[in-house]
Amino acid sequence: MNFTSMSCDDFVEALASKDPVPGGGGASALVGALGIALGNMVGNLTVGKKKYASVEARMYKLMAEADLVREQLLSLVERDAKVFQPLAEAYGLPHSTPEEQERKDLVMEAALKAACDVPLRIMETVCRAIDLIAEFAGLGSRIAVSDAGAAAAFSAGALRGASLNVFINTRSMKDRELAEELNRKADGMLAVYLPKADEVFLTVRKSLQA
């Protein structure tokens, strides 16, 4: 099923159902795509305006990069759903004998690692989005500053949501060295990029309340 080709109504209905996909990872990727799309909106409202002629060249570069980031995040909505299926099947494997348990453990470890890889990629892509959104907010048209702030808020939410999909899977890993390495990667991105997104949001809010 291609979730990104659904109508908004159908996607939200699928998300609300008992079906395991789409879930929090795919929803986080979609929220990230919405955030960077708002960044591009700021760009489109900036270019062609005499007042912002000095930043127009940079704005076009930001918009081109934002297009790529948005496409990557939308593809990760689909990828997140695909990697969950093997994990769901692994949980259901028989484990009545030592041989069955050994096989299940091996399959589970591989499935858990794959299920961590996608939300980590979502996080990495959202971090790039936050870098771009910070520039959109700083250089873009003041008439769209609220959209830049919303973009930052969406991106922070996407980053937080994707991180939880890393942590729920690393918790079940038997390879604790790998699990802690993946946790450190996620924690590192949260430590750097949540404050950056929050700073953009708070700066925008302050400017609107001045």
Image (cartoon, helix red, strand yellow):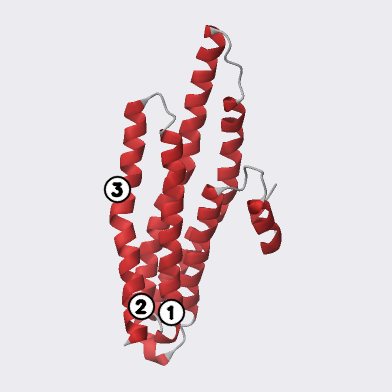
Residue at the location (42% across, 51% down)? 123
Disc 3 designates what residue?
A: 188
**In the drawing, does residue 199 fall left or right of residue 101?**
left
| Cα gap from disc 3 to disc 2, whole angstroms | 25 Å
> How many neighbours does mark 2 have within 10 angstroms: few (below 14), some (14-19), or many (20 or more)?
many
Disc 1 designates what residue?
A: 146
- Residue closer to the observer: 164 or 76: 164
Disc 2 designates what residue?
A: 204
- Residue closer to the observer: 78 or 194: 194
Q: How many numbered badges does the structure rendering display? A: 3
The amino acid on which the numbered mark 1 sits, given as a three-letter code, is Ser
Q: Nearer the N terminus, badge 2 or badge 1? A: 1
The amino acid on which the numbered mark 2 sits, given as a three-letter code, is Val
Callout 1: helix, strand or loop? helix
Callout 2: helix, strand or loop? helix
Q: Is residue 152 visible?
A: yes
Write down the quadrant of residue 205 in the picture: bottom left
| Cα gap from disc 2 to disc 1, whole angstroms | 7 Å
Q: Is residue 125 visible?
A: no
The amino acid on which the numbered mark 3 sits, given as a three-letter code, is Gly
Residue at the location (52% across, 30% down)? 111
Q: Is residue 18 above or below residue 114?
A: below
Q: Residue furthest top?
A: 98
Q: Nearer the N terminus, badge 1 or badge 3? A: 1
Q: Nearer the N terminus, badge 3 or badge 2? A: 3
